[in-house]
Amino acid sequence: MASKLTNIAIRNAKPGPKPIRLFDGGGLYLEISPAGGKHWRLKYRYGGKEKRLALGSYPTIPLAEAREGSEAARKLLASGVDPSVAKREAKVVQQASIRSVQRTC
């Protein structure tokens, strides 16, 4: 089994000419863009297709929180739900509730 990421390794990671991926295990990885952005991604399979789920940017989302998000997505997969669809639906519900609050003000 590959070694897990550490906070020190993430802080010290430098961008290169191409995107760099630092894997943590279970499909979770940190993608470092050539511009220097560090973004958490989860690679998974659903319905026979490979998919990726964005979990947020580092340091806004620290390593521990990214692992929690990855675990939550895996639980959704285990129950037969596509995590990207669930995330999209939650976003729509949140935007609808914000609009309803703005109308009442």
Image (cartoon, rainbow, N blue to C red):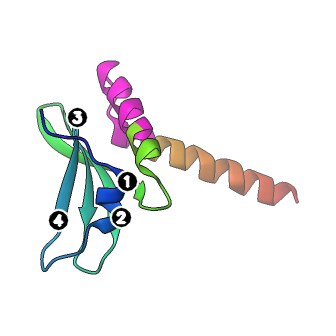
Residue 84, placed above or below residue 81: below
Q: Which amino acid does label 1 sit on?
A: Asn
The residue under label 3 is which amino acid type?
Gly
Are circles 1 and 2 on residues that touch, CB within 8 Å? yes
Tell me the magenta residue range.
Answer: 68-87
Q: Nearer the viewer, residue 90 or 68?
A: 68
Which residue in the protein does label 1 denote?
7
Q: What residue type is labelled 4?
A: Ile
Which residue appears farthest toward the top when viewing the image?
79
Report helix, strand or loop for mark 1: helix
Q: Earlier in the sequence, mark 3 or mark 2?
A: 2
User: Tag 2: residue type?
Assistant: Arg
Residue 76 in the magenta stretch? The answer is yes
Q: Give the CA distance from mark 1 to mark 2.
A: 6 Å
Q: In this view, does 59 lie to the left or right of 30?
A: right
Q: In which quarter of the image is the N terminus?
A: top left
Q: Position of residue 84 (x, y in %)?
A: 35, 43
Name the disc covering residue 26, or none.
Answer: 3
Q: Is residue 93 above or below residue 103?
A: above
| Residues at marks 4 and 3, CA–CA distance in whole angstroms | 18 Å
For the C terminus, the quadrant is bottom right
Which mark, by number, is residue 11? 2
Q: Foreground mark, 4 or 1?
A: 1
Q: Position of residue 18 (x, y in %)?
A: 12, 74
Given residues 48 and 68, the one toward you in this image is: 68
